[in-house]
Amino acid sequence: MIQRAFLVLLALTAMVATSQAATITLDLQLNKVAKTYEVFATVDGPSKGLASFSIDILGAGGAAVTSSLLQVPRPFDADLGEFIGFTLLRSNGATSGTNRTGVRASQDTTASDPAFLIFDVGVATPYLPVKLASGSYTGALGTLTAKVTTGNFFNLFPQDYTLGSNTVAATSVIPAVASVPEPATMALMAMGVAMVGAVRLGRRRRQGALGANS
């Protein structure tokens, strides 16, 4: 009887865990002309949205992240006379070699008034992805990556969240990688090189023909 009760408890625990399971999908978009980037996040799965996060933005292969700036919502509420949303633990990150580490912010989950919180941030349907941060980079080749590394996190408001209760960690975080330049740009560059080579080869052949006829 005790064993059966234990198994039921395990099943219920698994059901709760599954019901709260949510995945964060990151998206990294580049403006190759301006050398800027934007990082977005989408919450897929049962959740009342993003509560807090911390990520690294990494440069590799000749690309380097030179700046980052938080973009998560922190509007000023005239009725409250305070900023709401992601008001705590705000950091634009620190420079570490070619990287920008510890870009983070949090909502005030200890607030006694729900008006200080913004729910459904980043929830996939029917809302849009939330912009976490933007910044600049240098380099003609390489990659930029937005991801969770050791010490970083994504926490969410569970569907049954009540004021003062705990947030939950995202089940998984899918990183985003963008090429500098993007593959399409590299293909265009390769085509340009090939065209220049073809033109030079044509000139040499014409010059050779003229020399043979003289």
Image (cartoon, rainbow, N blue to C red):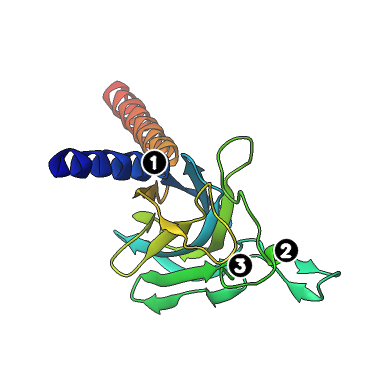
Residue type beneath disc 2: Ala
| Residue at 85% in and 70% down | 78
Viewer-proximal residue, 210 or 189? 189
Task: Classify 38 as above or below 52.
Answer: above
Asked whether disc 3 touches disc 2, contact meaning CB atoms under 8 Å apart, the reply is: no
- Judged from the image, the secondary structure of the residue bearing numbered disc 1 is helix
| Residue at 32% in and 41% down | 12
Residues at marks 3 and 2, CA–CA distance in whole angstroms: 13 Å
Image quadrant where residue 183 sits: top left
Assess disc 1: are there few (<14), some (14-19) or many (≥20) residues with their C-alpha within 10 Å of its C-alpha.
some
Task: Classify 25 as above or below 69.
Answer: above
Q: Which residue is mark 2?
A: 115
Q: Which residue is mark 3?
A: 86
Residue type beneath disc 1: Met
Give the percent coordinates (x, y) of residue 46: 48, 40
Residue type beneath disc 3: Phe
The numbered mark, 3 or 1, whose residue comes first in the sequence reads: 3
- Judged from the image, the secondary structure of the residue bearing numbered disc 3 is loop
Assess disc 2: are there few (<14), some (14-19) or many (≥20) residues with their C-alpha within 10 Å of its C-alpha.
few
Give the percent coordinates (x, y) of residue 106: 54, 68
Query: Can residue 35 be seen from the camera position used here?
Result: no
| Residue at 66% in and 72% down | 112
Label placed on residue 186:
1
| Residue at 39% in and 35% down | 187
